[in-house]
Image: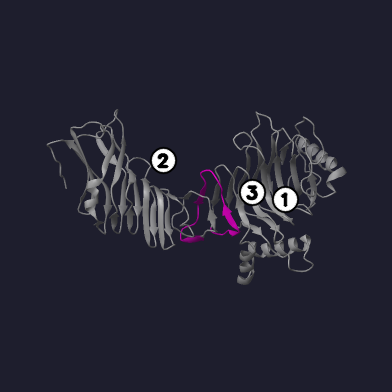
Amino acid sequence: MRTRSGAGRSWQGCPAACGAALLVVLGLAAQAAAQAVTPANVAAEAAVACANAAFSGVSWSAGFVSNVAEVTFGETSTDRVLGLSCVSVDGTVATGSSPTGMIAWSEARFDASAVGTLVEIGRVSGGIHATGLTNAFGILAWSETAYATNPAAVRVGTLDGTVSANVKPGGAVAAAVCARTSVELTLASGAVVFGGTCGWDAGDGSATNAAEVLRALLSKVKARTATAAESNALVSASSEGYAVLGGTGSDRVCFASENVAVFGKVALGGGYDTVTLAGIASGKSLTLPPVTGAELLAVTNCPDVAVSNAAVFAELYVGSNALCRLKDPAYTVAGLYGSGTVAPLGMLAVTNRIEVGRFGGAPTGSALTVTGNLTLGAGLTCALRAAETAGVWANDTVAVSGALTVAGGGTVDLGCTAAAPFALNTRRVVMTAAGGIVNPAALAGWTLAGTGRDSETRLLRIVRAEGNSVVVVMARRGMMISIR
């Protein structure tokens, strides 16, 4: 682990052992890092490293292989960039009386050149746990000032271990992973994340007892030996807690396996936030936890994945190497993007934009496939690029296996420019519907744009239905092309 800090102090009840022992622990670690040998605290599951001494105007570093207990960097009046960077956490990070497992913190004063507060971990294969009476955070990055000049971010490259935050009932917040500005997190096979209240009503009702009860249950979940009743108890205990609590910036949470257990809400706050399904094996299903604040569901490198609880997303992207089966009965999205395949269980409607080339860099001439029925909302724009290469025209298409319903007017945007305009006297198929086109007359109210000749008044720019196809035509007035 590499760290940078200015003035530091304990935060909300850092264990008393952090005092005199701190400099010894950090000194041994720094010496070990310099000599490239194993630090002295490797074997200790709960070695303490809390920065509660003053490091006035000094940058310093400490190296730990694993098994660090509470890690707190920062202070409420710091003016320094704060960071905590770990290659991996392979052992256990667990708090005593303090409510946070790993934290980087800064508040009112900050250097104008500062890039903010950061907790960055390459991999969590062990456990990070926090238990508190009023708040609990497994991994936290926080800054009290404007995020544009002092952001606070959490980045975890791979989480296949366990992170938990267990707060007493009636407490304020329990969040396993939390950042004031942004969270970047990948959940790999075996990941277990919990935020909520568990075990406080068992035994003596103490924080220690609650922590032991929760960690025992999470161990069973990770080993896949938990009973349905035990899993349901965790679901109930996490109903008001957060597995991931994002901030004011752009958050990204990736599910890289269907073998993950997420107890608690995924609330991603402000900014343009994305939940990604990536690399899930063919034929697998994933039920997403409750998600709020996320704009985009992106599905990539998933040959055939079924996803439930995804109807909350405003936009959907499916990459060229993915097939996404939507298991909820109805989906209405503002944006549908990509060149993969979407298979809705029931209704799929798009209200604002369809764009094949967005996000994934698919070549012009790619197709977005809908296996089922598709409704085009009134006012929709279909961005379907057209381009000529070596004298041959190609364009993006939308292929629907069921019925294509046209609710009202809209636009087909070909993305051509004045430097490379759409060719005159040209007809191109932009959509097909094997199940037929419902309300084809509405296409008469559609506009053909992005031709590179949009301002020329002597041209016909037409969108129309021909059988089970939607075609676009551009020709000089007085000439009509109909090629079948």
- What sort of colour scheme is used for the picture? one colour
Determine contact: label 3, label 2, CB under 8 Å: no
Does residue 189 appear anywhere in the picture? no
Q: Mark 2 Cα within 10 Å, few/some/many (few <14, many 20+)? A: few
Check disc 3 and report its element: helix, strand or loop. strand
Q: Earlier in the sequence, mark 3 or mark 1?
A: 1
Where does the image place residue 157, in percent across and percent down from the top left? 60, 46
- Residue at the (54%, 50%) spot, across then down: 254
- Residue at the (70%, 42%) spot, across then down: 104
The quadrant in which residue 270 appears is top right
Which residue position holds label 1? 101
Where does the N terminus fall, quadrant-wise? top right
Where does the image place residue 309, in percent across and percent down from the top left? 49, 60
In this image, 260 relative to 374: left or right? Answer: right
Q: Earlier in the sequence, mark 3 or mark 2?
A: 3
Which residue position holds label 3? 178
Check disc 1 and report its element: helix, strand or loop. strand
